[in-house]
Image (spheres, rainbow, N blue to C red):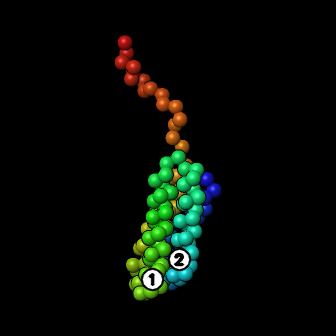
């Protein structure tokens, strides 16, 4: 639960930093890599207590994509606009999936719907 709260904050920070950097998308590759690693570690931590594992698994994949983006940005100098969209959408997705995993609690006992017994 705590890991998902922290991943929501990481995702919001990624979206914020993508939008408000000057020019938009001109992020420090080292800071982006550290944030991506933090998202991966927290998603792996959250995976241990999540009921459904696909949200944290998706956050691990998104963190890996952000880590690759940071590496490519440092090695080849990706255009800020390309980096802007990857980081913005990745940050939004990380935050949404972590919040979904945080708030989703499936019903434990299945209750039959009204009229499902056949009415006999």
Work out whether 117 lies above or below 3.
above
Of all residues, the one furthest to the right in this rendering is 2
Q: Which residue is drawn at 49% across and 68% down?
A: 63
Q: Mark 2 sits on what residue?
A: 32
As displayed, is residue 107 above or below residue 6? above
Q: Can residue 61 be seen in this view?
A: yes
**37 with respect to 84 (left or right):** right
- Tell me what residue is drawn at x 45 percent, y 59 percent: 58
Q: Which residue is drawn at 55% across and 70% down?
A: 37
Q: Do the residues labelled 2 and 1 touch (CB within 8 Å)?
A: yes
- Decide if residue 23 is in sight here: no
Alpha-carbon distance for marks 2 and 1?
10 Å
Task: Report which residue position mark 1 lands on.
Answer: 73
In this view, the residue in front, 53 or 114, is: 53
Q: Residues within 10 Å of mark 2 (few under 14, many from 20)?
A: many
Could you tell me how many numbered marks the image carries?
2
Among all residues in the image, which is located at the extreme top? Answer: 120
Where residue 87 sits: x, y (%)?
46, 73
Label 1 CA crowd tier, 10 Å (few <14, some 14–19, many 20+):
many
Secondary structure, mark 2, is helix
């Amino acid at each position: 639960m705590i890991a998902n709260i922290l991943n929501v904050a990481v995702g919001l920070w990624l979206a914020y930093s993508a939008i408000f950097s000057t020019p938009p998308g001109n992020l420090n590759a080292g800071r982006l890599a550290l944030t991506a690693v933090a998202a991966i570690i927290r998603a792996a931590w959250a995976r241990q207590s999540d009921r459904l594992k696909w949200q944290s698994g998706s956050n691990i994949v998104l963190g890996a994509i952000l880590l690759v983006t940071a590496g490519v940005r440092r090695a080849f100098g990706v255009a800020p606009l390309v980096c802007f969209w990857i980081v913005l959408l990745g940050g939004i997705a990380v935050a949404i999936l972590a919040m979904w995993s945080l708030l989703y609690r499936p019903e434990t006992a299945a209750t039959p719907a009204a009229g499902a017994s056949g009415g006999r």
